[in-house]
Amino acid sequence: MIAIAFFIGAFIFASFVEYWMHRLMHKSPKVGQRHRDHHKRNEGQGVVWEFFDYVKGSAIAMAIPLFFSVEAGLGWIAGALAFALFSAYAHQLQHENPTKVFWMKMPVHYVHHKYNMWYKNFGLAVDWWDHVFGTYEDVEWLTEEEQRLSERGYLQLRWW
């Protein structure tokens, strides 16, 4: 039971860290250089490479609970990895087919790029924290261009 609680906690905490890291990348010239390049290209690296980046950046934080309890630590690691995979998929999906992001009213990361929003819509996989911290901005985003993409499936995107 404790592993499940830690899984959920890690999933939510990872979404919180992702939100704030994305905001930091928009504030800090040093931290955000690679991110600015991402905005210029307006494309993801592929699900696998996004996942590796997320895991590489958080590997130490993932392991800390193992020092207190194996069960809690394994739950935490599983939750963090699950969020990293979900976020990598969501990020790539929003770049390639935002109409498939059914779990949000609006694909915030897609809109963040489409309208060059440097101060709004920082979520990648979820929009919770944008709502909590007042950075959510609802816009009309679904045009004919996006509707043409909707014919593609959920797995028809760049994986590598």
Image: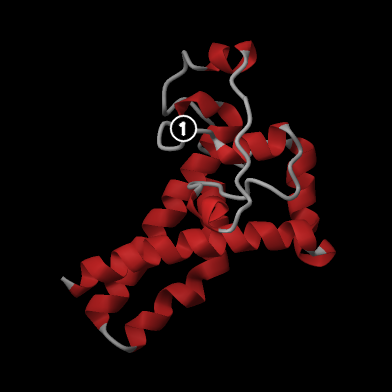
Which residue lies at the image location 73% right of the left edge and 50% below the top edge? 119
Q: Which colour scheme is used?
A: secondary structure
How packed mark 1 is, by other alpha carbons closer than 10 Å (few <14, some 14-19, many 20 or more), is some
Looking at the picture, how far across and down is residue 14, in whole percent?
47, 63
Vertical position of residue 93 compared to residue 127: above or below: above
Vertical position of residue 60 compared to residue 41: above or below: below
Q: Can residue 124 be seen in this view?
A: yes
For the C terminus, the image quarter is top right
Q: Can residue 80 be seen in this view?
A: no
Looking at the picture, how far across and down is residue 13, in whole percent?
44, 66
Which residue lies at the image location 40% right of the left edge and 37% below the top edge? 103
- Between residue 72 and residue 8, name the one nearer to us: 8
**Amino acid at dot 1:** Val
Which residue lies at the image location 63% right of the left edge and 51% below the top edge? 135
Vertical position of residue 109 compared to residue 129: above or below: above
- Between residue 125 and residue 155, name the one nearer to us: 125
Looking at the picture, how far across and down is residue 108, in whole percent?
58, 39
Counting every numbered tag in the picture gives: 1
For label 1, the residue is 101
For the N terminus, the image quarter is bottom left
Q: Residue most toward the left?
A: 1
Looking at the picture, how far across and down is residue 22, in whole percent?
65, 57
Vertical position of residue 50 compared to residue 74: above or below: above
Left or right, 45 with respect to 31, comes to left
- Between residue 133 and residue 67, name the one nearer to us: 133
The quarter holding residue 54 reads bottom right
- Between residue 37 and residue 100, name the one nearer to us: 100
Q: Residue most toward the right?
A: 29
Q: What element carries label 1?
A: loop
Left or right, 66 with respect to 101, comes to left
Which residue lies at the image location 42% right of the left edge and 55% below the top edge? 83
